[in-house]
Image: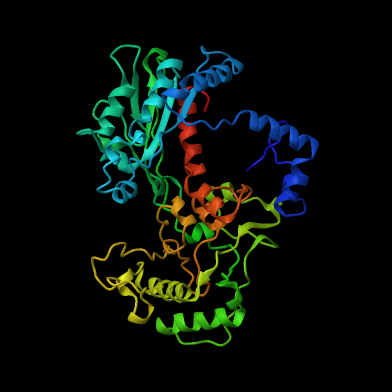
Amino acid sequence: MRLVAEDAGHFPEEYYSFLRRELTYPEFVDIPHIAQAMKHATSEVHQIKLGPSTREETDELIGTALAAAGGHDEPWVLIGGPPCQAYSLVGRARRTGDPTFATDEKHLLYREYLHIIRKFRPAIFVMENVKGMLSSQHEGGAIFRKIMDDLRGPDGDEGYDVYSFVAPGRAELQPKDFIIRSELYGVPQKRHRVILLGVLRATALPAPRQLIPLPLIPVSAAIGDLPPIRSRLTPRTRDSESAWAEQRLIALSTAGKPPSTGRRIPPVGEPFMPGYVPKLPAGPLADWLLDGRIAGVTLHESRAHMAADLVRYGYLAERAKHEKRSPRLGDLPVNLRPEHRNAASPDAPFNDRFRVQLRHEPSTTVVSHIAKDGHYYIHYDASQMRSLSVREAARLQTFPDNYFFMGNRTQQYQQVGNAVPPLLARALAEVVAGILGRA
C-alpha cells in the first residue's frame, strides 16, 4: 500500500503516522480524505478468474474504464501476463508424472490476454512471464512460439510488431533476446523474466529504444545500512538473548571463528523501528528507496527459527564471507546436516536449499517461496544469523521504504516475491512513454 495525494503528488502526513504506528489501520482509513482516496482506489480493483466464462464481465469492465479515460480512440497500454505456474521450471518439476499437467488450463490463459488485445486494440502491450516460458511445451509444440505467432497476428495493420526491451530490431530476434536480466538495469537482484513489447502497426508509432545497462548493485548496497536484528528462537518458550547467543557461539566456533564474549546481541526487529538513519551509497537506488519522513524503518523483523537452523545460518554465512560463495548442503559438517538420508550426497535434491545472499553480488531471485521458509535467503552477516526481513526482501525488489505491505508476515513475503521490481517497471514505463512521445 502506498497512497499519494492527488493534488500535490506527495504522501499525506497521516500516512507517515500510520507507518510509525501512531495510527491504527482503522483510524487511518477513517480519516475523510483517506477514506475518499481508498474508495476511489477500490473502485478500480477487480478480482476475476479469467476464462471464456468471464469474458463478458471483463469486457464490460475494460470497456467502461476505457470510455471513462477518453474512449477507445485514445492510445492506451495493456500491461500484464498470464499466470506463470504452468511455465515455471519449479512448477513443471513439481508436477513431473502428473497426468493432468498437459491439460492444465493455465497453459492457455495467455489466450485471455490475447482476447483483450484483439477486442480492444491497445496501441501498446507489455507482457511479462517467467523465463521457463521459453522452454515450456504444450501438445507437442513450444508454447512461446504459439504465443508469439498469436500476438503478432496477421500481416498488415491488424497485427502487432513485437520488440525486445534489451535487444534492437525485431525481425531477427531469438527467444533469449526477450529475457530481461534485472541486475543489469539497476536492480540488486538476479531476477530474469521474459517481457514482450508489442506496438500496433496501424498506429505507425516509432520503434522503442532499449533499456540502458547500469552497473551491478550488490546486496550490501541495498540492505547493508538497515539496523542489525536477531530472530527469535522457536518455540517461543525457548527464546532469550542468552539462548540465542549460545547458538551463535556454536555456529561461529564451528566455522573456525574465535569465540568472543563481548560480541553485541542485536535487538529483535519490530514492525516499526524508530531512529533509523539511512546510510546507503548515494545514487539512483538510494534516491528511489529512501524517505526520511518515515523517521525509522518498517517491517524489519525476522521470522523465528529453530535453534538448529540458526546454527546452520550463522555457520554458512561465516563460510560464505571467506569463500566468496554460498556453501551447499553437502558443505555442512555432519553434526549440522539435516536428518535426511541423502543430505551428504553430492546429487541430493535441493542441494542448494540453504543459500547465503552474498554481500558483494546481487541477490538471487526473490520469489514467493520466501513466505514458506528462509533457507534460501540467509543474511550475509553471520553475527545476525537469520533470514531476510520483509523490508530487506522488499529492498532487493526495489520497493521504496514508504511502501507498506498489508496482511500477516507470510502474506507480506508473498506480495514481495510475486512482484515485478518497481524500479525496473519504471524503466520499462519510460521506454513505453518514449514510444508515445511522452518521455
Q: Which image quarter is the N terminus in?
A: top right
Q: Is residue 112 above or below residue 394?
A: above
Identified at 29% across, 40% down, the residue is 100
Taking the image as drawn, is residue 281 in sight?
no
Give the tally of numbered discs.
0
Q: Outermost residue, right direction?
A: 32
Q: Residue 182: x and y, percent?
A: 41, 46
Identified at 40% across, 14% down, the residue is 204
Looking at the picture, tell me which residue is in the foreground, 333 or 205: 333
Q: How is the image coloured?
A: rainbow
Q: Residue 420: x and y, percent?
A: 47, 42
Q: Outermost residue, front direction?
A: 99
Q: Residue 86 sits in which quadrant?
A: top left
Q: Residue 207: x and y, percent?
A: 38, 24
Q: Residue 133 sits in which quadrant?
A: top left
Compared across the picture, whether 244 is left or right of 181 comes to right
Identified at 58% across, 15% down, the residue is 67
Taking the image as drawn, is residue 436 in sight?
yes
Q: Is residue 333 above or below residue 390?
A: below
Looking at the picture, tell me which residue is in the foreground, 334 or 395: 334
Q: Is residue 14 above or below residue 331?
A: above
Q: Is residue 222 above or below residue 322?
A: above
Identified at 49% across, 65% down, the residue is 387
Compared across the picture, whether 285 is left or right of 364 comes to right
Looking at the picture, tell me which residue is in the foreground, 263 or 351: 351
Q: Residue 167: x and y, percent?
A: 32, 35
